[in-house]
Amino acid sequence: MRGYAYFVERPRRLEDLLCPHLVERERPYSIVTAVQLPKIDYENFVTDMLADRKFIEDYGKRCRARDVWDCLLVQHRGGTDGVLVLPEQGCFVSWAAYVSAVR
């Protein structure tokens, strides 16, 4: 899936991704892998995105910052929204964006 999203550098919490922004500041992205987490693990992730995450280390090697950012989509099982992640050094969130209604 492809689209446009507003990416934030090193966000700590989901709320950091929900700030008003100009549409012109959105970047094109492509989802290379989607990770479905149990609800409690997803809530843990979105309340502290700066912590090391094994699933980012496992799938982050597929992600790249190019003209179109190849990202990891992190969702809770059964959810339609999620967080796009562009990792740094294997298991850290370098850039992230909130997306809604992703299937």
Image (tube, helix red, strand yellow):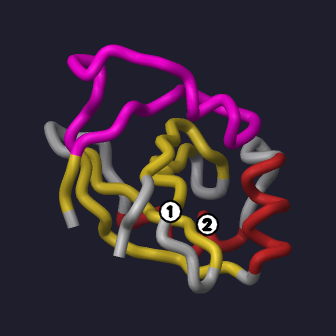
Q: Quadrant of residue 21?
A: top left
Q: Quadrant of residue 18?
A: top right
Taking the image as shown, residue 53 lies to the left or right of residue 55, namely right
Quarter of the image that includes the N terminus: bottom left
Taking the image as shown, residue 39 lies to the left or right of residue 60, namely right
Q: Secondary structure at mark 1?
A: loop
Q: Secondary structure at mark 2?
A: helix
Q: Position of residue 37 (x, y in %)?
A: 67, 79
Residue closer to the observer: 64 or 31: 31
Amino acid bearing label 2: Glu
Amino acid bearing label 1: Asp
Residue picked out by circle 2? 57
Taking the image as shown, residue 2 lies to the left or right of residue 80, namely left
Q: Nearer the viewer, mark 2 or mark 1?
A: 1
- The span picked out in magenta is 4-28
Taking the image as shown, residue 36 lies to the left or right of residue 52, namely left
Quarter of the image that includes the C terminus: bottom left
In magenta stretch: residue 20: yes
Q: Decide: few, some or many residues near mark 1? Use Cα within 10 Å; few <14, some 14-19, many ≥20.
A: some
In magenta stretch: residue 97: no
Q: Is residue 93 above or below residue 22?
A: below
Q: Position of residue 46 (x, y in %)?
A: 73, 52
Residue picked out by circle 1? 81
Q: Residue at x 68, y 42 (%)?
A: 14
Q: Residue at x 48, y 19 (%)?
A: 20
* Lower position in the chain sequence, tag 2 or tag 1: 2
Q: Is residue 55 above or below residue 46?
A: below
Q: Position of residue 30 (x, y in %)?
A: 24, 58
Q: Residue at x 33, y 39 (%)?
A: 5
Give the total of numbered labels.
Answer: 2
Q: Residue at x 43, y 32 (%)?
A: 7
